[in-house]
Image: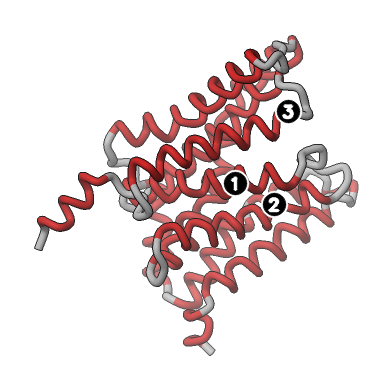
Amino acid sequence: MLRAAKRHSVLIYFVLAAAWFWASLALDRVRALHFWAPLLGALAPAISAIIVTAITEGEGAVRQLGRKLWQWRVSWRWYLAALGIPLAEALLAVSLAQLAGVFQVRRVDVVMLRASLPALWVAFLFAAAEELGWRGFALPELLRQNGAVKATLIVGGMHALWHWPLILLPKMWLSDIPVLPWTISVLAEAFIFTWIIRGTGGSVLLAALFHGMSNIAMVFYGGIQPHWMPRVKCGVTVAATVCLLLATGPSLRWHTHKRAQRASP
């Protein structure tokens, strides 16, 4: 049984994370649990990854997984990329929407941004809980036996499917967003996550910074007309991913890294 669990560890992880998260959405309908259920649901990827790792690999592997959250000694360029790419995409989207006449600065968005500044750290906290599972556990496991593109598409697909109830069910946080452009955006963004993970030696911290800043940058999209916002977001994200693939190739590594690997014994 243990051998089968190791062989299908990513599948077990996804089933556990999805069951946990989707159950929390059901509990969210209970008035007394309306505050706590989403918080517990957000922890599903991290806790699922810890449980599966403990069962299949043991305590030492769990400690190693946790250390990825504190892996901060990477080049400053990766911090610039993790924090800067979401902002650059948002500013490009706003510029394109403004040129097309479908963008308008709304006072409510400015007020909301100012009010949320003291609590921005929460976005990074929840991002870390997600990325410990998706990019700390699932992606490295898939990269052991798959190429970067295939592994990225699998993780991105699971990540998108995990969120689908928030879009498909009524009165959820993402219920007003079309599922197709949103899913394409998540799949495209997954390539940037893989690039960051491979370039930083597996730093979940940097993946969490990128994830959290991506969520924060969505404030800029609030001025785009609702019909166009998901499509503009999707187009900009896909364009960024295409540029990344052209620069790195299917390995999602810088070419300088490839030359260094060839030169090493």
Identify residue type, mark 1: Val
Total number of numbered discs in the rendering: 3
Are the two marked residues, 2 and 1, in contact with CB atoms closer than 8 angstroms?
A: yes
Foreground tag (2 vs 1): 1
- The residue that mark 1 highlights is 186
Q: Which of these two is toward me, 172 or 27?
A: 172
Res. 122 visible in picture: no
**First-in-chain label (2 vs 1):** 2
Q: Residue at image x 65%, y 69%?
A: 15
Q: Which label is found at residue 163?
A: 2
**First-in-chain label (3 vs 2):** 2
Identify residue type, mark 3: Trp
Q: CA distance from mark 3 to mark 2?
A: 21 Å
- The quarter of the rendered structure image containing the C terminus is bottom left
Identify residue type, mark 2: His
Q: Residues within 10 Å of mark 3 (few under 14, many from 20)?
A: some
- The answer to whether residue 85 is above or below residue 264 is above
Q: Which label is found at residue 228?
A: 3
Foreground tag (3 vs 1): 3
113 sits left or right of 125 in the view:
right
Q: CA distance from mark 3 to mark 1?
A: 17 Å
Q: Residue at image x 47%, y 48%?
A: 191
Mark 2 falls on what kind of element? helix
